[in-house]
Every structure is written in structure tokens, then in C-alpha cells.
Image: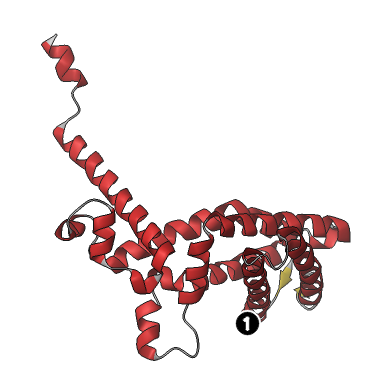
Amino acid sequence: MNVLAQDLTVPVESKRELAKAKTRRALLKSALRLYSLEGAQGMSMNKVAKGAGIAQPSFYNHFESLEALQNELSAQLKDNYLSPMRLAWVNMLKDYDVLSKDQFNQQCRQCLIMIFDSAFENIALFQHLLEDRPRFSDSIENQSSLNNGLGNLITEIQEEWTEIFIQGLQLSNRSCERSAVNLCVDMAAAQVHELILGCHQQRYSRQQAIATLSISFDALFANFLHGSNTGQ
């Protein structure tokens, strides 16, 4: 019996690692909850630690700084947001030439539904991410305080969208200057962000917003894709 009991005992080191991983997840969850409530200006190491049920000095056992925690949380959020829809957007761009207008609109709507669903999973988080993104009018000091972690997540996601569009263009044997892709992505993102907020304010339905965006994207992509160079 003693041998059997010994075999079933979890090593002390493993227990410590499990406990440390659990606390690390609690800190990330606490930071997400706090950011969703107060945005970047409300974030502090003490508040994050308190929300995770630990003392502030213990924070350093898991992250070297609040910025390091935010960077990890930002990377997780970006991956969770983009992973389900990356392939759908790439395929829609890749197949643009063989899709009928109705087929394109249908695929575009499905892609937009994924974006809206993701935003409305935590609309408070989405609003704070938009509010805290760096702007041209920000001072250098303010940009440096926000231009990392969660404060820069929207910008990083738009950069990822540029890469997604470029991949779709390459698969459709097209090439285009990065600046033109950035312009297309910025225009599309601005429309999406504005209509998500409009839906949240109940100015119109999500169905109306997605239908309008689908029509707008049809025109935007037609102009953009027809202006790109097609490989021989």
C-alpha cells in the first residue's frame, strides 16, 4: 500500500508548478477584467495582484513587470481574435476572381459576423482598446506610455490584417504596394469599428450594419483588387 500511495503522489515540484501556472492565469484574468472596466489608465500592479488574490510583491514571481503581463495578455487576445477568421479572409481574397457577387457577399458577411461576434463577447474591452490606441494627436510621452501591450493592440491587429490581405493577394497571383494595402485595411477597419459602436448604442441592428458593410467592402475590394498587379 505504501508503494502504491507513493506512486500516486504528485511530486512537490509539480504541485508548485501547477500552483504557479494557476496564479499566472489568475493574474491574466484579473488584468483583463480590470482593463475591461477601467482601460489602460486604471491598470496598476497592485490592482491586478489584488484581483488575483495575491500580494503585490508576489507579482514578480510570475511577471517581471506590468508591461510584460500586458504584452502576454495582448498576444493571447490577438491570437484568440484572429485565429478563427484568418483562413476565411485569406480564402475570400484568394478566390475573389472566381466568386460571383452573391458568393462574395455571402462570404464577406460570414467574415464580418465573426468580427462582430468577437467584439460583442466583451464590448467594454473593445471600447477601451479603441479609446487607448495611440493617435497622431497624442504627445510623445502619452504615446510611449500606451504604445505597448494592450494600448497598442488595435494597431497590432490592423498590422496583422495587412499581412492577411497580402497573403490573400499573393495566393491570387496579385501584388500590391504595402502602403496601398495599409490604406485599404485602415478604411475597412474604420468602418467596422464605427458600426460596431453604433450597434452597441442601438442606433441600428447588427444585421443592418453587416449588410451595409458587405456592400461597402464589395466596392472597396473591387477597386483595390482591380488596381493590383496580376502575375502572369
Residue beneath the point at 32% across and 49% down: 25
Query: Does residue 100 appear in this view?
Result: no
Q: Give the answer, above or below, for where 12 lies relative to 232.
A: above
What x and y, as percent, mark residue 106?
Answer: 80, 55
Residue beneath the point at 41% across and 68% down: 150
* 170 left or right, relative to 218: left
Q: Name the amino acid type tagged 1.
A: Ser
- Callout 1: few (<14), some (14-19), or many (20+) C-alpha neighbours within 10 Å? few
What quarter of the picture does the N terminus occupy?
Answer: top left
Query: Does residue 129 appear in this view?
Result: yes
Residue beneath the point at 39% across and 58% down: 33
Instruction: Kindly give the residue lying farthest to the top in the view shown.
Output: 1
Give the quarter of the image for residue 147. Answer: bottom left
Q: Give the answer, above or below, for where 36 lies relative to 8.
A: below
What quarter of the picture does the C terminus occupy?
Answer: bottom right
Element type where label 1 sits in the image: helix
What x and y, as percent, mark residue 178?
Answer: 62, 78
Between 136 and 91, the one nearer to me in the picture: 136
* 64 left or right, relative to 157: left
Residue topped by disc 1: 179
Give the quarter of the image for residue 186. Answer: bottom right
